[in-house]
Amino acid sequence: MTYVISEPCVDLKDKACIEECPVDCIYEGKRSLYIHPDECVDCGACEPVCPVEAIYYEDDVPEQWSEYYKANVEFFDGIGSPGGAAQTGPIDKDHPVIAALPLRVHGD
């Protein structure tokens, strides 16, 4: 089991969750953040600090965002498990589900 970052994070990337993650498993893509499913230890520290409530436990992701579990897993195809986001830095890609979304300005 793992935590999943869903649509409210797209084009926001607040990063409060990154600061709280004790295992550095939250990676930055072009338009969204992603939780590495093999590096996440299911501590839940990221969930309460997300200002837009974009983070859910895998079994609790709302139905309208169910594809975000797959997006968080598949984002790491070809990347593998780098062992920490800090050493990797931002990754210049997004999962196709996120890349296909229209650009959004939060607060509108």
Image (tube, grey):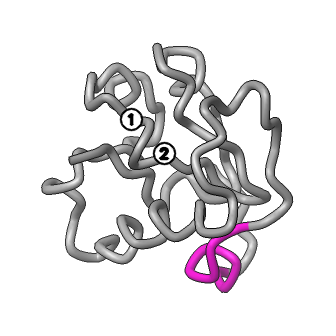
Residue 14 as seen in the image, left or right of residue 34 = right
Q: Alpha-carbon distance for marks 1 and 2? A: 7 Å
- Is 41 situated above or below 92? above
- Mark 1 neighbour class, 10 Å CA radius: few under 14, some 14 to 19, many 20 or more: some
Question: Quarter-wise, where is residue 31 in the image?
Answer: bottom right
Question: Which residue carries the number 1 mark?
Answer: 40
- Mark 2 neighbour class, 10 Å CA radius: few under 14, some 14 to 19, many 20 or more: many
Amino acid, disc 2: Ile
Task: Report x, y in % for residue 3.
Answer: 32, 44
Amino acid, disc 1: Cys
- Is 25 situated above or below 12? above
Range drawn in magenta: 94-101
From the viewer's side, name the closer residue of 92 and 77: 77
Question: Quarter-wise, where is residue 53 in the image?
Answer: top left
From the viewer's side, name the closer residue of 93 and 78: 78
- Is 49 situated above or below 74? above
Is residue 66 part of the magenta span, yes or no? no
Q: Which mark is residue 35?
A: 2
Residue found at x 61% / y 48%: 33
